[in-house]
Amino acid sequence: MSLQLLSDMTYVITAAHPDDAATLGPLHLRNWLQNYPNADAGIDESWIREHRGSSTTAEGITQWREFIEVANQHPAPHFCRVVRSETEIVGYLCGHWDESESVTLGPMYLLDHAQGHGLGGRMMTEFLAWAGPARIRLGVADYNEGAIRFYQRHGFEITGERYLWRGRLPTLLMTREAPSAADCS
């Protein structure tokens, strides 16, 4: 657990608790509604609610609860941390090992009012320590320039691969390669 005092607000990064699922589902949708609308890509509130609104349903919250429970019971292949203020959860970062022996980062979000204080960097530092020397991959909306710069500051590179998530959201693949033996010496 790490603590950080910003202004008069204390933020704590902790493992997620199963009861956090009721907050994380709606927070996931809130983050999408804040970060992803893009008229050029045809991404509007209606499209976001169609593709991410399920996170606020009883089934979506149950899925969050199950992921958190698995992450807490089996932390080696699963990672889920939340940033708590004194009154609310303001961010989260999750990830998991996949079949190809690499790590997938995501989702990662931090509410606008909690950005710019180093909290994202602190979450990323914990995530990178958990992932160890593994290759890490993620997808990011190609128009989310702030997120792309954040990931680049943490060693991620754009691979050049692009895809349309759910046939519409233009997404870049980014990776952070495992350090070579030469890098570790």
Image: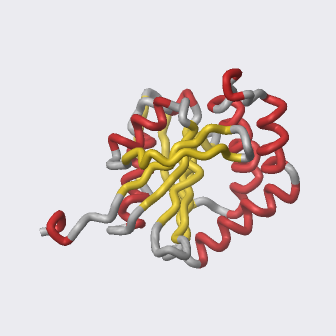
- Where, quadrant-wise, is the N terminus in this rendering? bottom left
What residue appears at the point 83 percent right and 49 percent down from the top-left corner?
54
What residue appears at the point 73 percent right and 63 percent down from the top-left corner?
65
From what the image shows, is residue 176 above or below residue 74? Answer: above
Q: Which residue in the rendered view is the most extreme toward the left? A: 185
What residue appears at the point 17 percent right and 67 percent down from the top-left corner?
184
Give the image quarter of residue 113: top right
* Residue 23, horizontal then vertical, whole percent: 72, 48
Describe residue 63's horizontal placement relative to residue 150 as left or right: right
Total number of numbered discs in the rendering: 0
- Where, quadrant-wise, is the C terminus in this rendering? bottom left
Any part of residue 84 in sight:
no
From what the image shows, is residue 91 above or below residue 149? Answer: below
From what the image shows, is residue 101 above or below residue 173? Answer: below
Towards the viewer: 81 or 160? 160
What residue appears at the point 50 percent right and 74 percent down from the top-left corner?
100
* Residue 165, horizontal then vertical, whole percent: 68, 46
Describe residue 72's horizontal placement relative to residue 149 as left or right: right
Towards the viewer: 35 or 22? 35
Any part of residue 17 in sight:
yes
* Residue 5, horizontal then vertical, whole percent: 41, 37
From what the image shows, is residue 164 above or below residue 80? Answer: above
* Residue 10, horizontal then vertical, whole percent: 48, 39
Q: Which residue in the rendered view is the most extreme toward the top? A: 39
What's the coloring here?
Answer: secondary structure
